[in-house]
Amino acid sequence: MTADARPPSAAQTVGLGAVGLALFVGIWLALTLSGIVPRQFLPTPIDVLTRTFELLAHPFAGATLPVHVLSSFERYAYGFLLAAAIGVPLGLLMGRFSWLNDIVTPVFDGLRFIAPIAWVPFAALWFGTGIGGPIMIIFSGAFPPCLINAYRGARFVDRNYIEAAQMLGTRNMRTILEVLLPASFPSIIAGLRVGAGIGWQSLVGAELIVASAGVGYMMVQGQSNISTPTVVAGMIAIGIVGLLIDVLLRRLETHVRRRRGLA
Amino acid sequence: MRPSRRFFVGITTIAALFAVWAVLTMVTGTVSTGRFPSPLQFWESARQVLTVGYADATLFAHALHSLKLVVMGFLVAIAAGIPLGLLMGWSRRAEAFVNPVFLLIRPIPPLAWIPLAILWLGLGDAAKIMVIFFAAFVPSVINTFTGVRMIEPHIIEAARMLGTGRRRMVREVLVPAASPMIFTGLRLSLQASWTTLVAAELVGALAGLGRVLNVAQQDIYPAMVMVGMAAVGVLGWATTRLLAMIEARAMPWLPARA
Amino acid sequence: MSAIVFESVHRQFERDGKSFPALDNVTLTVADKEFVALVGPSGCGKTTCLRMAAGFEAPSSGRVLVGGVPVTGPGPDRAVVFQQFALFPWKSVEDNIAFGLRNRKVPADERRERIAGAIRLMGLEGYETAFPHQLSGGMQQRVAIARAYVLDPQALLMDEPFGALDAQTRVVMQEELVRLARVNPRTVLFITHAVEEAVYLADRVAIMTRRPGRIKEVIDVRSIRAAEAWDRHERVEDVMDLESFVHLRTHIWRSLREEKVGGER
Ligand SMILES: Nc1ncnc2c1ncn2[C@@H]1O[C@H](COP(=O)(O)OP(=O)(O)OP(=O)(O)O)[C@@H](O)[C@H]1O
Ligand SMILES: [Mg+2]
């Protein structure tokens, strides 16, 4: 419910948005160009764009921006897939067999309040700072939503389906694969999407703390060289990749929901 | 009888894990205590940090420092986020005005602000509060916004026909009607605040639980890492419980959940 | 004076980019302290009429006046009882009823008195501090009516207020409304699908055509009620048994059925 007697027209919406955006960029420019804030600390939008294009071709902190992004993404993909590969089946099994749920839940609840990023020291200790450590961090961020949503999906599947399957003499494994998995698919996809977002965040955090490559590492190097444009360029790159991941999974989610008639 | 079985299984699981942990680290030595501390080492480290202190302060002082920053950043963020969410929810024009800037900033994960915060504000408290602000701000805006948009139109019309002025409309209708969603936002904001603070302190800090973790990592002192993590978990749990209690107090009118 | 007047009211709505008429030249007057029931086929525009009188919507052309003044927006001089109750879930029964009075800055003493009066009238004693979700549907409806009545509004606008109630509660509420109308007569516009309810409660019944809605016929119940002395009977069912009642009801039924079956104009 809104207060507007009638919604603004499309032109008004665009116009207001443009004014808002112009104000934002205007204040930014005014602060930097007037010298109130030293340019070293707050670069102009143009500085940032120039730096971003520069980084596309010229390496900084050992690689160009695209190479940093790729190396981040590679670790991200491994960690996320691992979280999904363990979280989803475990969640489904927990939804199907309550004894397993009774065993896993207390452990899970005990660990739930530890921020994923707090695993960084152990991750570094156990798996090093190359690829293993960051993967563990992404895993610890992405795992809980994967597990919880698969569990909820399976737990709240209409009992009738399962009973129908059992009545037809379906064995447990097939009940899970052919009834539980498809029926909880929308919930699983939603969990994957949330997990993907948290995982990407966690990766960035991990790279800021312990890493020798990746966008986060590039940003830390930029920070210690007091190259603010590099830092902001890194933020932009991270934002864009995160957005792409989200858009992609959102697409998948609506697609799945629509096919289920849930849209 | 299911809850009691669940309780029994839960206790047994925890006890079994503890036993396995103790046996593997202390009896058989299968797991090297250089990488994974034994329960005894954990206990010793906890005692050390509680009494003598570690990384320049006792656990209590570190925890209090972290807690203070989380609370401050969280409060500043929601003090800005809830009103903005109300405004954007209530007026489509305000939404149209703010949305492009919001969409521009939103995809940047809060943790990615850490280097910039350090550049601007150094390793002290101000930088931490800034990143916590960015982390906690977005969920509180989005959920408040959604909460307002989800208000049943009839409720607003009822308030209008009763002659409700602008101020009372916000205070007595919009805020309470949106409060279930607002609290959802607060829970997410609080969670994000802890994650961000720990990350920011791990990147660099003069005190706090993240610093305990950081120094312990550099000292290759796994037992202390574990103590630090446990402290993070306990504080996260305690603040979440506190928020849940406030939530229950604030909305006695909600039908009890089954 | 608080008569509600619809003067050649038209209303267009947009759907899928196309504009279609919902109301076509509605002219109707609800006189001061008169109870008019509005009946008509579903989708004919009854709610739209009521929302215009309430000030939630404006006519595309024509005028809606209350007390001789064109309606520009909602206000506490016209209290609305919504079909969906629209109580504030976060306020107790008492606070729901008090809300409009507080908006008007009625002093605390007077407020307390009026609230107590409204609670008594609606038989809600003992539930003052209950929240809406703790009440039955019928009780919630009574709170909604109390919330409107306590303002002592010039006009009451009620949109199928008993639509969601079970048969027994409905009868009780109807009797209560008749009793209230005697104690404290108000200008009332009352929408209903139940023809018996309309005849039982109203001074006049206005029948609308199917969409686009127009006033097809207005039936004077008051003179027959007085002539046949319906008010001697306390109970709804006794009144509904009277030959004069059955006659009116059947007449309205026929008129409505024409609309549903062959009424396309
Ligand atoms: N806001 C709106 N936008 C578009 N069309 C509308 C709107 N409000 C009402 N209509 C249309 O106007 C017509 C009349 O609606 P209205 O709600 O007044 O009918 P009604 O007589 O109250 O029906 P019912 O008895 O089913 O409640 C309907 O065809 C409806 O679809
Ligand atoms: Mg209607």
Image: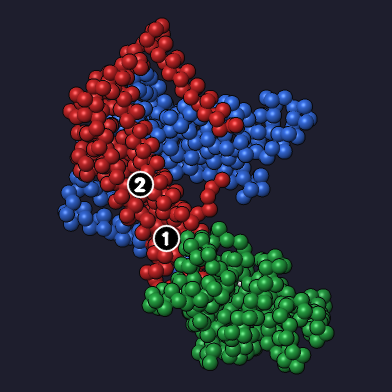
Chain colours: A blue, B red, C green
Does A167 appear above or below A41?
above
Quadrant for residue A200, please give it. Answer: top left
First in sequence: mark 1 vs mark 2: 2
Residue C5 appears in view: no
Q: Residue at image x 36%, y 38%?
A: B238
**As displayed, is residue A197 above or below residue C117?**
above
- So how many labels did they put on this image? 2
Q: If the picture is divided into quarters, which one holds ligand 1?
A: bottom right
Which numbered tag is attached to residue B238? none
User: Which chain hosts label 2?
Assistant: B
Circle 1 crowding by C-alpha within 10 Å: few under 14, some 14–19, many from 20? many
Residue closest to the eye, A28 or A65: A28
Secondary element under disc 1, as helix, strand or loop, is: helix
The secondary element bearing badge 2 is classed as helix
Q: Does residue C86 appear left or right of residue B213 in this picture? A: right
Whether residue A22 is visible to the viewer of this picture, yes or no, is yes
Residue linked to disc 2: B136
* Residue highlighted by disc 1: B175
Label 1 CB, ligand 1: below 8 Å?
no
Q: Is residue C107 found left or right of C77 in the rendered image?
A: left
Above or below, comparing residue A255 to residue A70 in the picture: below
Residue positioned 60% across, 31% down in the render: B1
Residue at image position (39%, 69%) is B168
Q: Amino acid at mark 1?
A: Val
Q: Residue A100: image x %, image y %?
A: 57, 26
Please indicate whether residue B121 sits to the left or right of residue B187 in the image: left
Tell us which disc is closer to us: 1 or 2. Answer: 1
C24 w.r.t. B32: above or below? below
Residue A247, how many percent across, how many down? 50, 44
Q: Amino acid at mark 2?
A: Ala
x, y percent for residue C219: 73, 88
Q: What residue is rendered at 58% in x and 65% in y?
A: C140
